[in-house]
Image (cartoon, rainbow, N blue to C red):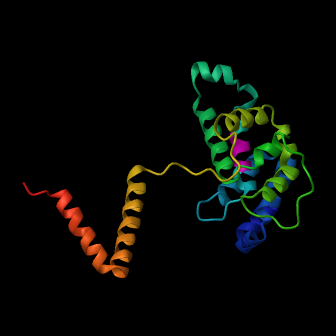
Amino acid sequence: MRLLNLMKEFPLLSMFNIHENLLEALLELQAYADVQAVLAKYDDISLPKSATICYTAALLKARAVSDKFSPEAASRRGLSTAEMNAVEAIHRAVEFNPHVPKYLLEMKSLILPPEHILKRGDSEAIAYAFFHLQHWKRVEGALNLLHCTWEGTFHEVSVYPKKELPFFILFTAGLCSFTAMLALLTHQFPELMGVFAKAVSIMSFPHF
């Protein structure tokens, strides 16, 4: 398409989110192969993400399996590779902006998007769902797959979900904080901390 060629020739166009408008237009035309081509160019870790990029990628993955997807059947036989790819894409989208599913699933009423959009915020979710809900409805079973995946993993999320930190990171952070506190106390109260250090030494290494 000519617009795709223009964006290759003039990459600065991406600064104006032209690619997001292009995705919306291509989805309206149901030109899914062209949508995939745009995503392949812009869904890159080095570029700023958006709800449009993340959820469109999830929609394309869901489209490959959603028409035949059944949570009951999946629980019996396990997820196929394509279903797993779709579920993981939805996970990534929800991690980026967890507010979107409630609008796509019409659990929250859609309103006109606000003038100022905050990435990963509720305002971005409203704007995305306002312009893209019809595309999700057009793909048979896509909203069902979104609902099953989201409800099973992120149902009560109201902020960006945070992953559990490994124990050694928490331990190291705590140890560093404790060391910094000791250094501060030693600087402020050197004599008192000297007495404290002696007491700890005696308790740790008692003389028999």
- Is 74 above or below relative to 57? above
Q: Left or right: 76 with respect to 93?
A: left
Quadrant holding the C terminus: bottom left
The quadrant in which residue 202 appears is bottom left
Front-most of residues 112 and 41 = 112
Quadrant holding the N terminus: bottom right
Q: Left or right: 16 with respect to 203?
A: right
Q: Residue at x 82, y 48 (%)?
A: 27
One can see residue 121 in this view: yes
Q: Residue at x 71, y 49 (%)?
A: 158
Q: Left or right: 180 with respect to 11?
A: left
The quadrant in which residue 172 appears is bottom left
Q: Position of residue 6 (x, y in %)?
A: 77, 68
**What secondary structure is the stretch in magenta mostly built from?**
helix
Give the magenta part as a residue range.
Answer: 55-61
Q: Position of residue 96 (x, y in %)?
A: 66, 53
- Is 73 above or below relative to 159? above
The quadrant in which residue 105 appears is top right
Q: Residue at x 82, y 45 (%)?
A: 103
